[in-house]
Amino acid sequence: AITRLAAAWLGDHASVDGLAEHIGERAGGNPFFVEEAVTSLAETGYLRGTQAAYRQIRTIEELPIPDTVHALIAARIDRLPPAHKAWLHAAAVIGADFDPALLREVAEDGDDPATALVELEAAGFLRSEADGTRLRFLQPLMREVAYDTQLEARRARMHARLAQALERECGANPVQRSARSIAEHWTLAGNWAQAGRWNLHAAMWFAARDARITAAQLPRALEHLDRASPS
């Protein structure tokens, strides 16, 4: 089945004869590996064309692709133009789906992300939601790799900027549903005082709505506020 999937992705041009079998052997039963492997071969100049209509234009003596999907995605991200990679990293900090307007609040690059987002969508990293107002990572693993391959200090700075942007959206009333998300971003930013404060706001908001969430937020608030206090 995996070999047939690879053949469907490649097409039936004579130049790709046998390639589907090689990809199928490396895939280890993972269909997502097939998609990423074919995309990688196209991006690195071994294949030319489009899905189901590829031609091999360079000799492949050994498949020049990593053995895991995680490594394949990481290699694809590394090949992106620096600005595109920066916007993808910022999107990964926001979450699996996101409002593009938040990107400029979060990213360290202040340029307009519109062109990069269109190209990231065309490259198969993102897709538009049905209403056109939000974008989503095409696969959860893509977001995970884009997040994990960043420097921790850079991620923390973006989490802090995102928390501040979400705070501004709350206005004068911090006791809102988004308080839990704000607390999470302050936690990932390493700002324990702010994280504890927003854990308390979240506990208050969910008190009459979901006792389970309130019960989880209160000990987190105490833990974070304790970490923020001088020893």
Image (cartoon, grey):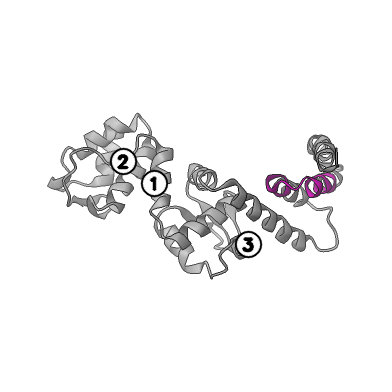
Position of 226 compared to 155: left or right? Answer: right
**66 or 170: which is nearer to us?**
66
Q: Position of residue 181 (x, y in %)?
A: 72, 49
Residue 142 visible to an observer of this rendering: yes
First reached walking from the N terminus: tag 1 or tag 3:
1
Distance between mark 3 and mark 2 Cα atoms? 34 Å
Distance between mark 2 and mark 1 Cα atoms? 9 Å
Query: Which residue is identified by label 1?
Result: 75
Q: Amino acid at mark 3?
A: Leu
Query: Which residue is identified by label 2?
Result: 65
> Given this view, does label 1 or label 3 mark the residue nearer the observer?
1
Does 227 appear in magenta?
no
Position of 91 compared to 157: left or right? Answer: left
Q: Quadrant of residue 221?
A: top right
**119 or 88: which is nearer to us?**
88
Query: Which residue is identified by label 3?
Result: 102
What secondary structure is marked by label 2? loop
